[in-house]
């Protein structure tokens, strides 16, 4: 079900043929919205931007982006000059807010067909010369943000894979590092950690760090890579990624903590790539886990030796994800028992 927060455009949004489980009307601070909906289960949230107090101050929108999953938010913009300025729209994209429109009729479409970064990349102003501008057509007249403005930057297709912990500290940082080591044998790969700096303990200077506000600029700066691995840790937004691995460490304590925190956790993961990480479960256990959680496990990753230069388990995972070049490189030949001294 969906929720809506309305103010100036309440009457227009009232006519939408959409089911809402909750609706609030008025003007609210970002903190009030976060407090009311941070633990509330919903499919999509439609926000009339005028319902956000001081919404023309982009930092108020930023507060929402830091604390909420903006891939589930559809923002109905007003017709003010500030909100429709190239700078404001670019900052929305930088924060991972891709579903915005001035057209009420476009909201229902966005619920079923959410935008990706590629759909709104033309609004992202990048302060760099690495991407050549191409000719554009005029923007849409209906107020929806699917047309093209004056400048469009040509983007290479690349895979942006987020690795996110579902249970607390499920190992996203180490798995990101190990996936990078495995992929870089056959692909151009970059690994970046968002809003944290645990990569420093891995003593690998090729690992990168950024914050959520600069993530899109980082992606654009590394657009020549085949793969960008994004370590989202526990709380990072998945909006910038075109695919996500959701890590669950299937120990009783961690699973019970997850369910007590959010009893709809597995409902939210329906259709997503669930990875059991640091798992001691066998095939029968995994089947029982799927039955009890009513979910589908994409891959079961046991405790791994992070000293190995080549790991057949991760090769199997990556090949399943479509990285076919690794198919001839899935053994551990030549590896030492303890790869401490190199």
Image: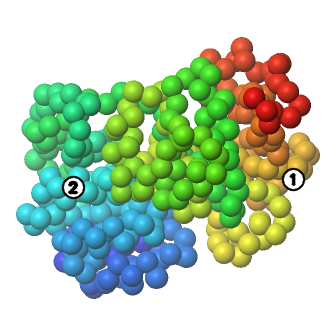
Q: Which residue is mark 1?
A: 288
Q: Is residue 161 visible to us here? A: no
Vertical relation: 291 (above or below) 261: above
Residue 31 location (% of width, % of height): 39, 82
Residue 141 location (% of width, % of height): 10, 47
Q: Is residue 220 left or right of residue 42?
A: left
Vertical relation: 119 (above or below) 308: below
Single out the mark in the foreground, 1 or 2: 2
Residue 95 location (% of width, % of height): 35, 57
Mark 1 → mark 2, Cα distance in angstroms: 46 Å
What residue lies at 25% left-to-right and 30% top-to-bottom? Answer: 131
Counting residues from the start of the chain, the first of labels 1 and 2 encountered is 2
Numbered-mark total: 2
Q: For mark 2, give the secondary structure.
A: helix
Q: Which residue is mark 2?
A: 89
Q: Is residue 288 left or right of residue 87?
A: right
Q: Quadrant of residue 70?
A: bottom left
Q: Nearer the viewer, residue 80 or 92?
A: 92
Q: Quadrant of residue 96?
A: bottom left
Residue extending furthest top?
328
Q: Is residue 253 visible to us here? A: yes
What residue lies at 36% left-to-right and 52% top-to-bottom? Answer: 214
Quarter of the figure that contains the C terminus: top right
């Amino acid at each position: 079900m969906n929720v809506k927060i309305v103010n100036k455009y309440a009457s227009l949004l009232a006519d939408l043929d959409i089911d809402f489980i909750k609706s609030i009307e008025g003007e609210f601070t970002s903190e009030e919205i976060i407090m009311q909906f941070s633990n509330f289960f919903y499919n999509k949230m439609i926000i009339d931007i005028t319902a956000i107090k001081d919404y023309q101050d982009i930092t108020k929108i930023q507060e929402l982006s830091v604390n909420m999953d903006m891939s589930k938010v559809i923002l109905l913009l007003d017709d003010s000059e500030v909100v429709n300025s190239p700078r404001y729209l670019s900052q929305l994209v930088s924060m991972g807010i891709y579903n915005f429109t001035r057209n009420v009729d476009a909201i229902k479409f966005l619920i079923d067909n959410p935008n990706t970064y590629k759909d709104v990349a033309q609004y992202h102003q990048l302060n760099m010369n690495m991407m050549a501008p191409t000719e554009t057509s005029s923007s849409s007249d209906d107020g929806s943000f699917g047309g093209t403005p004056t400048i469009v930057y040509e983007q290479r297709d690349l895979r942006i894979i987020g690795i996110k912990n579902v249970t607390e500290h499920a190992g996203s940082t180490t798995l990101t590092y190990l996936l990078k080591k495995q992929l870089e044998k056959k692909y151009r790969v970059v690994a970046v950690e968002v809003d944290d700096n645990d990569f420093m303990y891995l003593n690998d200077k090729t690992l990168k760090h950024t914050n959520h506000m600069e993530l899109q600029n980082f992606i654009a700066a590394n657009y020549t890579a085949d793969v960008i691995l994004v370590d989202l840790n526990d709380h990072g937004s998945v909006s910038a990624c075109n695919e996500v691995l959701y890590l669950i460490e299937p120990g009783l304590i961690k699973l019970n903590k997850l369910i007590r925190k959010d009893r709809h956790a597995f409902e939210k993961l329906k259709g997503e790539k669930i990875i059991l990480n640091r798992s001691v479960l066998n095939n029968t256990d995994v089947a029982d886990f799927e039955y009890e959680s009513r979910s589908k496990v994409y891959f079961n990753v046991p405790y791994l030796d992070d000293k190995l230069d080549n790991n057949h388990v991760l090769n199997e995972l990556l090949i399943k994800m479509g990285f076919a070049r690794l198919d001839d490189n899935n053994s551990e030949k030549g590896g030492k028992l303890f790869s401490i001294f190199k």
